[in-house]
Image (spheres, grey):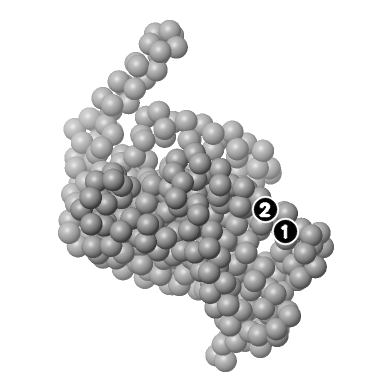
Amino acid sequence: MSTENEATVRDRIQAIFERDDAPFWLFAIAALVLTVLPFALDTFWTRIALGALLWVGLAQSWNMIGGYAGYLDFGHGAYFGVGAFVTGIAMTELGVSFVVGLTIAAAFCAVLAYAVGVPTLRLSGAYFAIATWAFAEAIKELALILDITGGNYGMTFPTGPESTGLPFVGAPNETFFYYLMLVLSLGTIALAYWLFERSEFGFRVKAIRDHEDAAQSLGIDATQIKRRVYVLSCVIAALFGGANAYYITFIHPNDVLAPLITDQMIIMALLGGLGTIGGPIIGGVMIFLLNRLSSLFLGSSTLYLPLIGLLIMATVLFAPSGVVGILRGEVGRDDVKRNLRELGEKFDIL
């Protein structure tokens, strides 16, 4: 493609993203396509799409506290696991349906996140990251020794037709879980867009992220706002954790409370673009497909981690604002050349 045509395509893409009504139309078209998608896919690809929706929602939930509020949360995956276990405990021990169990898990995680957020949100930077990482590790160790979570044996979910709690749904299948993840993902994206891009609350959150002392001097209650964002993001992670656990029917602390879950959320948001609505969507789909397709076509996911490492290096060095920044024209060819030249001079290779 010639340079002139390249510039024309780039200008057209930028023009689409700069339109005031662009988010609404992009969301509406995507929702329509995703709604009819299962009719065109077989079971295997429906599972792939279902997994992509799960990770887009999780990355978006981390982006609320990590991207918009600017707090590097390394314990976010703990709420994914707690949501899974509380949903399972409610269904097996209390005999409630999945819908009721998921509601109990969301309420439990809201209280837990508030209790954790009160002391940890007083910290910042690396101290907050270490505190949340330690919390996640403590939750994992606790789940491994408690009888109610199944300990080292894990937990199995009931799967009968009556287990969903929805009278118009029979035995849950791939299509049911696809639409469940679709509702959760689109709901999370719509909520994040309205809350952080269109409401006064979002402007206050960004003001705290950019300069907390200055925001407080303007009368913004930083403590209260940070707690609200933290609790909201954790509850969303718990909802996805409960839904995913019901889908896979068996959970173990080493799986649903693994540190890699939080790491992937961070990588997806970083690659797509921190503090943006589109970033976690793009990053979530890219990273998840890279993982699945490397297993499918290479027969192994061994190359997955090195590829992720290269992608993160390239993002941090050449496009700190992620793929969204490239689409917006914030990173051009000249920026990449300048970064390469500075990198070469730094390591004395140019």
Q: Quadrant of residue 322?
A: top left
> How far is disc 2 from disc 1 in space, using C-alphas?
6 Å
Residue 278 is at least partly visible in this image: no
Kind of residue sitting beneath label 2: Ala
* Mark 1 residue element: helix
Q: Which mark is residue 182?
A: none
Residue at screen point 67% across, 38% down: 302
Kind of residue sitting beneath label 1: Leu
Residue 16 position (above or below residue 53): above
On the image, the x and y values in percent for residue 314 come to: 44, 31
| In the displayed structure image, the side of residue 305 where residue 205 appears, left or right | left
Q: Are marks 2 and 1 in contact (CB under 8 Å)?
A: yes
Residue 228 is at least partly visible in this image: yes
Q: Quadrant of residue 145?
A: bottom right
On the image, the x and y values in percent for residue 206 come to: 29, 51
Residue annotated with mark 2: 138
On the image, the x and y values in percent for residue 42 come to: 58, 66
Residue annotated with mark 1: 142
| In the displayed structure image, the side of residue 90 where residue 235 appears, left or right | left
